[in-house]
Each structure stands twice: as C-alpha cells, then as structure tokens.
Image (cartoon, helix red, strand yellow):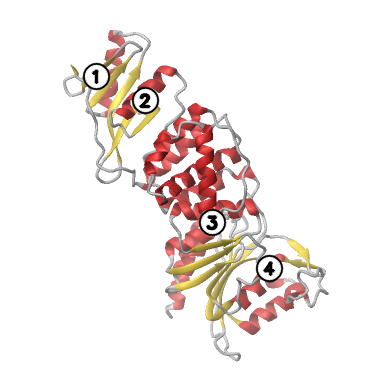
C-alpha cells in the first residue's frame, strides 16, 4: 500500500513518476519474497491499476543494484524498470534490459473504478497517516478528504484538488464543502503538515469523487477501528437485515431508519433493495455527521438525515407514512416515567419507571409504518419473554402480523455487546381483525448459518416446505 515517502529522494522519484503519467506509486511493495522500493501503475480501460514500472532507489550506482533490479523485473513482469539515484535516473526496457530514454505513460481512464483497488488505496491512506494522528482523526481526515473531492466534483472544479498544497487550502475547501452539503456538525480544525497534505492529494487523486463502494469501505473501517467509542452493527448482522428486507420484494418503497448510527444498516438496505427514499434519524451528532458525509461521497441523494431523537415528537416524522421501518435501537434501559416518554402506550402513561429503549422504538415504528408495510427490528430477547414487556407484546399483536422471529447466536453483536437479541419481521395489519396464519422461526447456531436462514424465509414466504 502507498505510504508516506520518508526519504527526500524517494519523495522526489514518486513526484517525477506522477509527472510522467504514473497514476499510483506504491512504496515498500512485497512480491513473493522480494521487497521492492516502488511500483508505478497506470489505469487501464477497465478502471484497474496496471503495473508499469518497478523502481529501486539507491544512493549510488552499482552493478549489484542493477542485478537486483533485473531480478525484481522477472518477478513483477512490468514493461519498464527504473534505477534512481540522486544524480540520475536510468531507465530499462525489461524484456532486454537495455537502457532506454525516459518513457511517458498514459492512463486510459481518469479514475480507478475497481472496488478492490479503491479499498487498497483508502487503506493506504491510513498507512500514510499512522503515527501522526489518533484513530478518530485518521477517520475524519479520510472522510473529510473524500467530502472535498465530492464538493469539487459538484462545482465542476476537480482540477483544484491537485492544486491543494497547504493545510490552509485544505481547510478552506473543507469549510465550503461542509456549508454546501449542509453538514451541520462542526469539526475541530487540525493542522496537517504540508508533506502529508500533498501525499493525501496524491493518494486520492485517482479515486472517483463519488462512488457507492465508499459506504461499505467506510463502515468496514469504522468497524475495525472500533475504539473510537461508537457502536457499529457487525457486518454479518447488517447483511442479514438487508437480505431479509430484500426477500420481502418491496418496490419503490419509502423507508425509515430510526437509529441509523453511521449508516451500517441504512446503506446495506439502500444497496440491496428498491428504495425510493430513506429518512434516517441519529441522535449522536458526530455519528449523524459521518452518516451525512458517507451518504454524499457514496452518491445517495435519496437519503435524508436528521440529527434528532426519533422518539421525540417532530414535524418530519408522520404516522402511517413509510413502507419499511428499520429498528436497530440502543441496547439500554431508560426512565419510562419522564415527561419525554409518558405519551408512549408501552410506558403505561409513565408508570413503568425502567423500560427497554427498544420497546419505545417498536411502538414508534409501528405508528410510523403504513398499513401493509413492514417493520424489521432487532430487539433484546427480554422484550419477547419478560413479564414487564407484556404490554409491548400485546401492542405488537394488536397492530402487526409477525412473519418471522430469528433468534441470533449469543456472540452476534460482539465485541460491542453480549446481549442476546432476535430479529423480528412484522407486517402492519390491513384490517383490524386480521390474524396471522403461520410464523417462521429460526435459531441459527452461528453467523455462518444466516444465509441458510434467509433462504428458508424466502421458501416459507412462497409457500414452500422448509
């Protein structure tokens, strides 16, 4: 992966290669057992990186250095090789290993358009920043940099990206991007060293300004860098959510995510399902800010984010107005007797002093979904079986048809939580006296069985035997 070029000579070589048309320079590449100083790539007509030149950077010329370069050329199979010293560059054509004049390189595409390559380049940015910033700062720099590129794209001014050379220029563009996209959460300005600013520009220059893969990569990074302090729904659970929703065969549906976080389930649903628009609520302002940024850089213009508590009364959230409601609530108890929650039926007008937050979310979801629409909810199993939650179960029975209860393995939410949870798939009744005919039940022993559960649910919904 691309790393910050620590030596001045290596930095100069990389810069010169860029001027000659090389799109990406990766340092300290390992091919087999060979440790190569640099490999330069161009972008082919499929949007993939194609290796063009291997580079060895030496303080002095020597026959040993040239023989080493020849060995590397056999392994890498690039058409060109470069031996670089402070005094001169020596270029070779690798088939014959004869010296040649300096070549020029051309790219058949402006941006890399291969998911794997894009992910490598973004993880390479973390290699670049490592040791200079905290993990949360690294994540912010990644998201902010992509936001600047999305802003320049909107302004038809992508050329200005390569002109950024100072922290001040970077900051000024970021302020404009925040204002343009209405990212209302403020940020703490960071002084980024000039050499790192320039390397950020280099590393991201070949990435498309907007791409749907950014949402998945961003969430994977947030999941792996989990010590930043906020919960991210594990990828196995969010994939299960999406597959179950997809199996409902909803078309052109208006959706609501009641506790979106960074968008773990939000984006999975938007990628996999036919969603006309999705409204997302997230009370944590930093998480909602990240969610907005990720939606912008991923190109989800049909996503609206509110940095509010979805449980509070608000004008935007109307009853009976969504075809799909997603519930992935905070797994905690709250005071049910406060003025904020006395209006909820399941608090018994505030007489239940301690109540599971998921019960409030379920009531709000049921009220928000339209007749015939679906609620897909992750709930602690206590809600399904405990005596205090009986009122919530009766409310569900009155308003909804439960189609599926999937009891997830105990470790499904680790390392974030050890709470045992179940996934409910519920449809709002079309008529008050409508009764459920059958119920799909599943209790997978491991996350590896989630795919089998989804297939079983699909078969059950079409009347097949399971």
> How far, Cα to Cα, is label 3 from label 2?
37 Å
Above or below, 115 against 317 in this view is above
Residue under label 3, please give it. Answer: 264
- Lower position in the chain sequence, tag 4 or tag 1: 1
Q: Which of these two is toward me, 115 or 138?
A: 138
- Lower position in the chain sequence, tag 2 or tag 4: 2
The secondary element bearing badge 1 is classed as strand
Tally the numbered discs: 4
- Lower position in the chain sequence, tag 1 or tag 2: 2
> How far, Cα to Cα, is label 2 from label 4?
53 Å
- Lower position in the chain sequence, tag 3 or tag 2: 2
Name the quadrant of the C terminus: bottom left
Residue under label 1, please give it. Answer: 91
- Lower position in the chain sequence, tag 3 or tag 4: 3
The secondary element bearing badge 2 is classed as helix
Residue 21: x, y in percent? 28, 32
> How far, Cα to Cα, is label 1 from label 2?
15 Å
Classify residue 127 as left or right of residue 155. right
Q: Say whether residue 269 is visible.
A: yes
């Amino acid at each position: 992966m691309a790393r910050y070029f620590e030596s001045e000579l290596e930095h100069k070589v990389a810069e010169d290669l860029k001027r000659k048309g090389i799109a990406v320079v990766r340092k300290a590449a390992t091919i087999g057992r060979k440790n190569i100083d640099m490999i330069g790539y161009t972008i082919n007509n499929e949007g993939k990186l194609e290796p063009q030149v291997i580079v060895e950077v030496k303080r002095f010329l020597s026959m040993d250095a040239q023989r080493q370069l020849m060995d590397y050329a056999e392994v890498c199979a690039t058409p060109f090789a470069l031996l670089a010293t402070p005094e001169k560059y020596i270029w070779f054509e690798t088939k014959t290993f004869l010296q040649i004049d300096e070549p020029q390189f051309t790219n058949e595409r402006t941006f890399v358009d291969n998911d794997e390559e894009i992910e490598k380049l973004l993880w390479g940015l973390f290699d670049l920043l490592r040791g200079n910033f905290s993990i949360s700062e690294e994540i912010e720099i990644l998201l902010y940099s992509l936001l600047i590129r999305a802003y320049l794209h909107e302004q038809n001014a992508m050329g200005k990206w390569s002109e950024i050379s100072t922290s001040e220029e970077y900051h000024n563009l970021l302020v404009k991007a925040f204002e343009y996209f209405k990212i209302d959460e403020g940020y703490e300005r960071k002084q980024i060293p000039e050499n790192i600013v320039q390397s950020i520009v280099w590393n991201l220059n070949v990435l498309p300004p907007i791409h749907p893969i950014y949402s998945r990569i961003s969430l994977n990074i947030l999941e792996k860098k989990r010590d930043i302090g906020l919960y991210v729904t594990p990828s196995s659970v969010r994939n299960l959510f999406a597959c179950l929703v997809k199996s409902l065969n909803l078309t052109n549906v208006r959706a609501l995510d009641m506790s979106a976080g960074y968008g773990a389930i939000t984006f999975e649903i938007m990628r996999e399902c036919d969603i006309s628009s999705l409204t997302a609520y997230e009370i944590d302002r930093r998480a909602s800010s990240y969610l907005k940024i990720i939606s912008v850089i991923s190109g989800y213009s049909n996503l609206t984010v509110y940095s509010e508590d979805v449980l509070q009364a608000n004008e935007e959230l109307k009853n009976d107005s969504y075809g799909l409601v997603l519930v992935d609530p905070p797994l905690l108890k709250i005071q049910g007797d406060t003025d904020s929650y006395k209006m909820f039926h399941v608090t018994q007008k505030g007489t239940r002093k301690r109540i599971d937050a998921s019960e409030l979310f379920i009531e709000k979801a049921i009220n928000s979904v339209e007749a015939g629409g679906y609620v897909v909810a992750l709930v602690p199993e206590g809600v399904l079986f405990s005596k205090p939650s009986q009122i919530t179960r009766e409310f569900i029975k009155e308003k909804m048809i439960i189609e599926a209860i999937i009891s997830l393995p105990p470790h499904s939410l680790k390392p974030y939580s050890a709470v045992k949870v179940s996934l409910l798939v519920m449809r709002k009744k079309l008529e008050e006296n409508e009764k459920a005919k059958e119920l799909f039940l599943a209790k997978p022993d491991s996350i590896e069985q989630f795919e089998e559960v989804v297939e079983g649910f699909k078969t059950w919904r079409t009347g097949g035997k399971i």
